[in-house]
Amino acid sequence: MSIEPEFVSSNAVEAVRWDQAAQLERYLDTLAIQAYAWRRAKWRRDYASLRAYAESVAPNREHWRAMLGIWPTGDERVPLEPERHVVAERADHTVYAVTFGTFPNVRSFAHLLVPKRMAAPGPAVICQHGMGGTPHSIAGLVEEDDAYHKFGQWLAERGYVVLAPHCINFIDWRSRLHNKALLVGRTLMGLETWREMRAVDLLETLPEVDSERIGFYGLSQGGKMALWFPPLEPRIRATVISAFYNERTKKQLVASPHYRPFINTREQSYFEPDFLTEFSDYDLASLICPRPVMIEHGQKDSSYYIETAREEFFPLKEIYERLGIGERCEWGEFDGPHEIHGVESFTFLDRWLSDGGPPHRHAAPVEEEETPPPPVFVNDAAIQAVRDDTNGQHDRYLDNLAQQAYDVRADRWQRDYESVEAYGQSVARNRQAWLAMLGGLPPEEEHVPLNPVRHVVAERSDHRVYAVTLDVLPGVQQFGYLLVPNGITEPRAAVVVQHGLNGAVQTVAGLLDQEDAYHRYGQRLAERGYFVFAPHCINNVTRRVRLHNKAIVLGKRLMGLEIWREMKVIDYLQTLPEVDPGRIGFYGLSQGGTMALWLTPLEPRIRAVVVSAYFNERTRKLTRESDHYRAYISNNEHNQFYSGQLLEFSDADLGSLICPRPLFIEQGTEDSAVYYKDAEVEFQRLHAHYAQLGLGERCVWGLFEGKHEIYGKESYPFLDRWLEHTPTA
């Protein structure tokens, strides 16, 4: 008897999407609160003496160094080879344009301001601009005034040698380079920290500079560098952090009428992996201690709320006071917006770098009055040329590291093809490294019982459809559809079917009155006699990026949490008497194909897997534009970038962790997201591992004439064969 189909509304679909994302976000918000306790547990400060204090925070300093990524070694430690030329002569100082080596084929640009008539080597200050700023503005080479108020020029007039380096200073470029750096085990801030170290090296080569009296002063993004860099650079004698220091968890994650949190912006580079698990702003500043530090902050700063900045200053001040050096930690508040103030901060620098007064006191006497030269300004085109050159050099440098990663990956695998058992043992370390890259599994205290709830939503001629919820984490439920064939007399095979971005479990289960890329493949498999579970995943790019960012700063990974969700789904399937626990397969399209490839290496209960419209030459898809697809580096899918991924894991490598289990790669020739020829090259690399074990028939390339979609004609029989299933339709 024919039964009328039952469909759900688009509102019901969207309600599920919002609910699942909201649950996961609340879970991560709870972890953000718990992170305060995590941080405190990771610090063991000893206030008995300055030496005892330094020794007690040494492990945290090393953790900070590691968190910022790999430092240049070997051939990457290029010589400075500084080059400079005069761009402006002023009454009391000369302005130079300077370049110096930082990485292979990367030269940093800066303006150097050197006071005239210096009687002896004097103090120097590195002045760092932030987003939208330039070293030209700091050096007074632009005519208009801005938030920097030409503070480098002021300091030079005061008698300081000033170096104003250029940093990557626009959000889109910072996000691009941040993502590329992550893939090769670096961070953008780590690269920029190295640049600042080379800036100190440069100052130490100058006869005009007393290398024992070098300070640092940065605004906004430059203030971030003023906080993040000195903990790793003991040559910085005193630091001014302007318009950045704050209660970091709130600034990162918590909305407020007083500021906009980074989680609500496009500023991807502010989400460094694992940051909030150990470091607050006062924790980082405590690594500058016992050296002098000043926090400069405007009462009307709309980017960094002054009340939360004060809140974060108090515990820092307490650390200095407990060590008996409270005078070295100063709070500089002024009535102004997001800008350099300079009044208290210049006096602060004088005190700690120049014996209490401005350095010009020590200048040689002027023999005769000189006529000040006319001001020199640079145009916008010249400024943009510096930006473009800096951005391009760093982009090419990271592309080169991505290319080198092919050889690095090869060295990290020591596969033994003597037997299946030997092979499994030889890749065990890589399997654990993959789990670690995804943030590991939730701790025991977060394991919750499934508490399954289900109810019928559709009766069909050959199967029944249930809506199911499962508890997977504290406060987080998994929604999905369970499709149960009629007339089951003995346990049978089951398949988990995972949709991708913009997809929905409802369409996979055939509950939407429309045709799309999924072709109701969950329904088709149920009609074939399979037990089918279709779980919901976070399926909107904006939501995924938001949750990815929250997770990553808290020591989690969105994909790691979703892998745990899939494991709980398999737990549930194994509780059902109608399911044979030894015959469970997985089939995912696009983002669901990601899950198929990323989960299965960590889930031995999956017996056979189909990866559809995802398997690819990963380095190219992530970082290299093509006429055949759009690379992730050029769109807003920041959640696709994982720290160190290219150093160990290609798609073929992940597939090799599924081996010896059967694996089917389904790919359309007209797929605009995955170029099939790149995917085929990567498949040959994967198939070689199966072939060397004599298991080539278990690794199958399923190419079809079609788009980014489920095909099924070859993949369904593949599942039938390896799940030992006899189709009923």
Image (tube, rainbow, N blue to C red):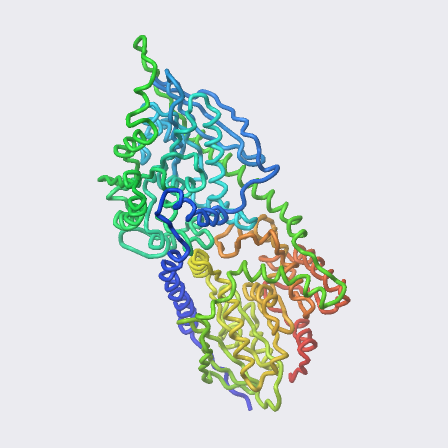
Q: In x, y percent, where is residue 386? A: 47, 32
Residue 292 image-quadrant placement: top left
Q: Is residue 321 visible?
A: yes
Q: In x, y percent, where is residue 684? A: 72, 58
Left or right? Give the position of 163 relative to 257: right
Residue 483 image-quadrant placement: bottom right
Q: Is residue 666 visible?
A: no
Q: Is residue 336 above or below residue 500?
A: above
Residue 285 image-quadrant placement: top left
Q: In x, y percent, where is residue 345? A: 29, 34
Q: Nearer the viewer, residue 66 or 647?
A: 66
Q: Is residue 250 above or below residue 355?
A: below
In the picture, which quadrant includes the C terminus? Answer: bottom right
Q: Is residue 503 above or below residue 160?
A: below
Q: How many marks?
A: 0
In the picture, which quadrant includes the N terminus? Answer: bottom right
Q: Nearer the viewer, residue 524 or 300?
A: 300
Determine the residue located farthest toward the front in the rendered image.
Answer: 48
Determine the residue located farthest toward the left in the rendered image.
Answer: 335
Q: In x, y percent, where is residue 488? A: 59, 89
Q: Nearer the viewer, residue 391 or 293?
A: 293
